[in-house]
């Protein structure tokens, strides 16, 4: 009961939208335009329903990882190149 009331609260909607807009801006700055647009859409959904915003963000998180479970794998080292910062 209290959880459903929390998800309907105006403050949580505002916080969710602000968080998604912030993440979207960071994605655009990193050059990840598809992710940025997806997060903008999730922010639009979150402004209507917090639950829809959380679900959309979860779907984007899953798609961004390529549908894999576990941490992202790094590319194998290239022969003749030392590991470290490029």
Image (spheres, grey):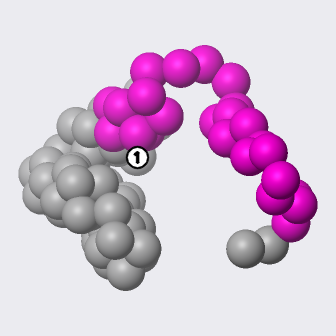
> Toward which corner of the image does residue 10 lie, by quadrant?
bottom left
Say if 47 sits above or below 30 in the image. Answer: above
59 and 84: which one is in front? Answer: 84
Query: Which residue shows up at 48% across the image and 34% down it?
Result: 65
Q: Residue at x 14, y 54 (%)?
A: 41
Q: Is residue 7 left or right of residue 66?
A: left
Q: Is residue 49 left or right of residue 63?
A: left
Q: Where residue 79 sits: x, y (%)?
A: 79, 45
The residue at the point 17 percent across, 59 percent down is: 37
Which residue lies under the disc numbered 1? 6
| Quarter occupied by the C terminus | bottom right
Residue 33 drawn at (x, y percent): 24, 63
Q: Is residue 63 magenta?
A: yes
The range drawn in magenta is 59-84
Q: Is residue 58 left or right of residue 78?
A: left
Residue 3 located within the stretch drawn in magenta: no
80, 32: nearer the viewer: 80
Asked which quadrant contains residue 39, the reply is bottom left
Q: For the view shown, which residue lies furthest in the front direction?
A: 80
- Could you say which is closer to the camera, residue 5 or residue 41? 41
Query: Which of the 4 quarters of the picture holds residue 11?
Result: bottom left
On the picture, is 44 further left or further right than 42? left
Mark 1 neighbour class, 10 Å CA radius: few under 14, some 14 to 19, many 20 or more: few
* Residue 15 in sight in this render: no
Question: What secondary structure is the stretch in magenta mostly built from?
Answer: loop
Q: 11 and 33: which one is in front?
A: 33
């Amino acid at each position: 009961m209290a959880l459903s009331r929390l998800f309907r609260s105006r403050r949580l909607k505002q916080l969710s939208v602000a968080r998604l807009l912030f993440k979207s801006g960071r994605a655009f700055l990193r050059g990840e335009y598809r992710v940025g647009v997806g997060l903008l859409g999730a922010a639009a959904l979150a402004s209507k329903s917090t639950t829809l915003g959380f679900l959309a963000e979860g779907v984007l998180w899953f798609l961004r990882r390529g549908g894999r479970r576990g941490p992202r794998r790094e590319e194998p080292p290239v022969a003749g190149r030392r590991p470290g910062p490029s």
